[in-house]
Amino acid sequence: SGDVKEITAETILIAVGGWPFKPDIPGIEHAITSNEIFYLEEKPERVVIIGGGYIAVEFANIMHGFGTKVTQLYRGPMFLRGFDDDIREHLADQMEKSGINLRFNSDLESITKQPDGSLVAKLKSGEEIACDCVFYGTGRLPKTENIGLKKAGVKTTKDGAIPVDQYSKTNIDNIYAVGDVTDRIQLTPVALYEGHCFADTLYGGMDRPTTHDYVASAVFSNPEIGTVGYTETQAAEKFGDISVFTSSFRPMMHTLSGNTNVRSLFKIIVDDKTDRVVGVHMCGDHGAEILQGIGIAVKMGAKKADFDQTIGIHPSGAEEFVTMREAKYHYVAGKKVDGPRPKAGM
């Protein structure tokens, strides 16, 4: 109607979330994102998925599960940047063995629609891939355009994210922001947590600053990734002296079924100075369910000795986390050394 309504408030909370990003390339109007894919009228027989984050990886596995021929393009050498390197490589191997065509160091140049309605995805290398659907999963940007932040004096990053302090307060005293609109971890449970901390502090009589260390997360791929804490690279850099425990095995269910391609990878990273478990990562069945429980222990400061004293549930994949006794290798002052750390006096 064009009417303008002015609303005043003692406190303003910005929680508008994010929006899928699509680059400005020829034919981009023919591509879909995680917004539109749920409204497809029929299953595409061939899909090209662009991106290397968890959204692209998850939809590559979803569409493959539906029987679609999937090609996933990522401009870097390995997808899921920020996750543990061993876990990333293990998942890539498992996805390729399942039949998904992973194309690393590949990027899209243009999309052309054919007379029959099909599409041609042209790579920057000049290669052309015929498909029925092009899906962009290259990330999400904060949805902060045209909501008056500049007029209110709220600072944003070049990508539109709103920097906040540990109480989710912006640079303006009575304006707060939570969730994907900020420059923190973009996960739904994290946004819920930030909102609870905000409400409890301002209206619940509590002092609840946010902390974003040891946040458990998952990638719902096939097999799933579950993770909490530091990656091996991060831990070596931060703690210097660490031990790394790994176990790769074929789950009993797949052993009985005769599927020889499916393997799980479990990994524990320990700060040797304190014996604290600072990272737990897995790629295998039920990764999210397993790491949700382990995430509590890691957040509470569990030590490797606590894991060792815990009796496993047999037969289960998760029992591997309490049966790994000897480190595969360790780090001294950030440098990798094969084998377990020598015991004192040896």
Image (cartoon, rainbow, N blue to C red):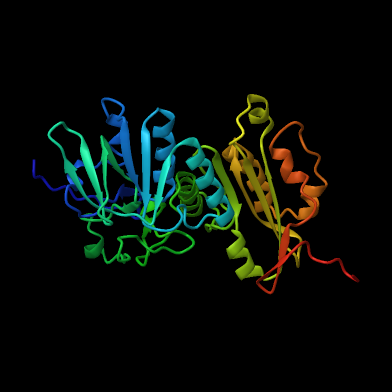
* The one of 111 and 267 positioned closer to us in this rendering: 111
| Residue 196 falls left or right of residue 312 | left
| Residue 270 falls left or right of residue 29 | right
Q: Which part of the image, by quadrant, shows the N terminus?
A: top left
* The one of 215 and 308 positioned closer to us in this rendering: 308
* x 49%, y 36%: residue: 98
| Residue 250 falls left or right of residue 153 | right
Residue at far front of view: 127
| Residue 197 falls left or right of residue 9 | right
Residue at far right of view: 345
* x 81%, y 39%: residue: 311
* The one of 76 and 59 positioned closer to us in this rendering: 76
When the figure is inspected, residue 156 is found, relative to residue 121, above or below; the finding is below
* x 61%, y 60%: residue: 232
Q: Position of residue 276 (x, y in %)?
A: 73, 59
* x 45%, y 48%: residue: 187
Q: Position of residue 222 (x, y in %)?
A: 51, 37
Q: Which part of the image, by quadrant, shows the C terminus?
A: bottom right
When the figure is inspected, residue 205 is found, relative to residue 39, above or below; the finding is below
Quarter occupied by residue 322: top right
Q: Is residue 198 visible?
A: yes
